[in-house]
Amino acid sequence: MLPTTANMFNCCRDVNCHLNAPLRGSVERSRRSESRQSFLSDTSNSTSAPAATPTPTPTASSASPTSASKKSSRSRSRSRSCSCDVGDVVDNAKQSAGSADSAINAAAAATAAQFTVSLHIDLFSWGLFLLAFFTRFYKLATPPHVVFDELHYGKYISHYMRNVFFFDQHPPLGKQLIAGLVSFAGYDGNYTFPRIGASYASNVPIFWMRFLPALCGSLLAPAVYKLLQEAKLQRWTAALGGLLVVLDNSLLTQSRFVLMESMLLLASTVGIACLLRFQRCSLGSLTWLCSGAAAALSLACAGCIKYVGFLALALAGYLLCRHLWNLLYDARLTTGQLWMHTVGRLLLFVGIPLAVYLGIFYVHLRTLHRAGPHDSIMTSAFQASLDGGLASITRGQPLAVVHGSQITLRHTHGRTCWLHSHAAVYPVRYKDQRGSSHQQQVTCYSFKDVNNWWIVKRPDRDDLVVGDHPEAIKHGDIIQLVHGITSRALNSHDVAAPMTPQCQEVSCYIDYEIKMKGELLWRVEILNRQTEGNRWHAIKSEIRLIHETTGAALRFSGRQLPSWGFNQHEVVGDREQTHQDAIWNVEEHRYTKTQDQRERERQLLSAEMIPTKRTKLSFWAKLLELQTKMFWQAKQVQSHMYSSQPHEWPLLDKGIAYWLDSSSSAQIYLLGNILIWYTASAGLFVYTILLIFYAVRRRRLCFDVSSEEWQRFLIVGDTFYMGYLVHYLPYFFVDRTLFLHNYLPAFVFKLLLLCYVLEHLDYLLRRHCIGRGAMLQHIVRIYRLALILWLLAVCYVFVKFLPLSYGSTKMSAEEITNLRWKDTWDFILQKNYALN
């Protein structure tokens, strides 16, 4: 029997399926006509008289009734009609009265609802918080010593207290929050955090310094619980996830000290949980707006604590794009609604993070307005914008660079160093047997020194005195630069540079009477003359010096000279003029007042370098420079005995020693719960195998799980599996020293994935075992018993390694050795005990 049109249409429930395209129009028209007919019939039935049986169709034999019967029939019909009309009126009156009563009751209920507050308490969530709170706050002020990176973060917080500028490669939100909290505790910021293990001074509120990280670490457990629930996992699985967060030693250790990871993890977790709720809300509703704003704000805060937090924002971008792609397949949405979805997400998840990021740095730069120990990494203009920030800003320093100006030329972008020369010369031959000019060395020196001074000279004048009518240097002018102490002019020629042979050597010219003439002319190019004008100004004018003879630009090469160059940095002449390392600016500046060389040298040697006042620099200019330095000029830790590589993290091959008691072997060592870490790695592997298996089977139209479970499987993959990859894989391409704590954001996502894998395995066992015999049903019970035993083992490992998390227990060498379950764990022993 051939299927009807309606059945053919119902064979595929997706209205967008291409198989339904030929039938969609006709079927919809037939459905609309049927609905109209049913509506009309319902209307006619409601207005006509009710009858017990349908009216029979007249036949030929009864086609001519008598007139009497006609009259009686008409009278009966009229009486029935009247009786029906009266009945209808009564019924309608009763219905109206009933509807009026219901409306009154509804209004009363609405009025009562306005004054009703319902309170829902999730005992699982509160239980997890209290358990985490106890473990994180237990002996929080112990040890009363500087622990690991408290050395750095504590210094930054102290700088906030005193409004002193500092440079850090991470955004400042976490430090700002802790600084704001300890300011209420009366901390004045005068502790210097000299070294790891140093005792805190009595004026340092240790508990309040560590309070916010510990609080965020306590809130992480219920946040993970809520995130798993938003991912549609069962309550017991969500509670298990929160409990595993509590029982992991690495998360415990990282939450008890002045470190940023606990705040970062909490913000990321809350942001992703709010995002999952946001994607289920209807467009434009209050819940949609609140959830989206909360997600964007939380993810922005994660990125403003550490830049790795923006990986969570990247994950959110992936989830949003994936959700929008699925919405394109929904035929119920119009084009306008799709545009509203897109624009709404852009406004929320681009606008809010950008506003938060700019606002936090605005507070950062406005708060840190005094000069500090990190000023030298910033440009001269930035230093001059700080109170007392630049040694070159002395009383009476002139602005315009003229003939006879005594200047120091600073490398503007990149490494902090100044154009420098000294009496030493280049060696006659280098190690590769190349020859040099044997002229006076010119380098880039990273410290303030009297040999950094140069005198600007016009080629057509023999004197170096400024005089009563200064001759300003402009864009395009030809000058000579005379070294202040040795009085030799800056020179370049077609001789290979010592460390960069593809560029030419830069030297100070010495006349050896060997017919090698000096090439001493340099052309001044002012790069920012649109804002600073054509005149060469100190501090703000960014210039490029072009060698007039060869066309090479004076450039900092970045390479270090050998011992014959005192390990200073090489300066070369580069034919590629547009390099950023060829940009310089005048930092210190004064006018030459005497022609006598000895008097000039005496003035240079006795020059005062005391900061006195600040110059103005806009917020946007300071922000741009600070961002450039943070991204490209961050301080690098060259090597560390506790550093590790990304491939060592999943199996916990190496930890980090945070603190050691000077009088015993009590110590704090960052180490995760090894049972959780190994099980989570196994869960990642199991999910990968299941994903491949299900994908291949469904391609063959074999459906092993229900559609609801498959959707959950995909949501978990998009959220937790991709979250793990996004937070883990980038570290394989990072060229800097890494530590185990860099893995913690990825570990949390792997932990979330493990919770789903455990629930999914339980689902598979129930699906294939229950109802198929007593023996198979026992497998489900055995699996659940194994989960309970595994959780007890996790608790045992957690308690076993608690002494390394709290550092409050004195341990013997044997006890520490017994905790060394892997040979790569570098515990520390006092009195040179060896770990065999």
Image (cartoon, grey):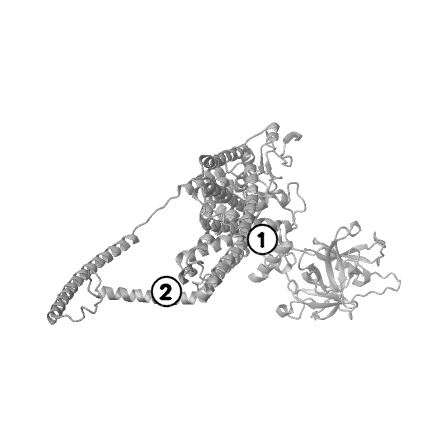
Residue 712 percent coordinates (x, y): 47, 49
Residue at horizontal 44%, vertical 35%? 774
Residue 26 coordinates in the image, percent (x, y): 41, 67
Using the image, tell me which numbered label, if any, was put on residue 31: 2
In this picture, residue 250 sits left or right of residue 766: right
Res 833 quadrant in image: top right
Viewer-nearest residue: 624 or 194 = 624
Counting residues from the N terminus, which is met first, the one under dot 1 or under dot 2?
Answer: 2
Q: Is residue 55 left or right of residue 743?
A: left
Q: Residue at x 88, y 64 (%)?
A: 515
Q: Nearer the viewer, residue 427 or 121?
A: 121
Tag 1: amino acid: Phe
- Quadrant containing the N terminus is bottom left
Residue farthest to the left? 68
Mark 1 surroundings: few (<14), some (14-19) or many (≥20) residues within 10 A: many
Label number found at residue 30: none
Q: Is residue 393 visible?
A: no
Vertical comparison of 193 with 106: above or below = above
**Which of the image's four quarters has the C terminus?**
top right
The percent position of residue 692, horizontal first and vertical second, equals 56, 49
| Residue in view at x 64 percent, y 67 percent | 528
Q: Secondary structure at mark 2?
A: helix
Q: Is residue 480 above or below residue 353?
A: below
Q: Position of residue 88 (x, y in %)?
A: 18, 62
Q: Which residue is mark 1?
A: 165
Residue visible at 62% across and 49% down in the picture = 731
Q: Quadrant of residue 239?
A: top left
Q: Are marks 1 and 2 in contact (CB under 8 Å)?
A: no
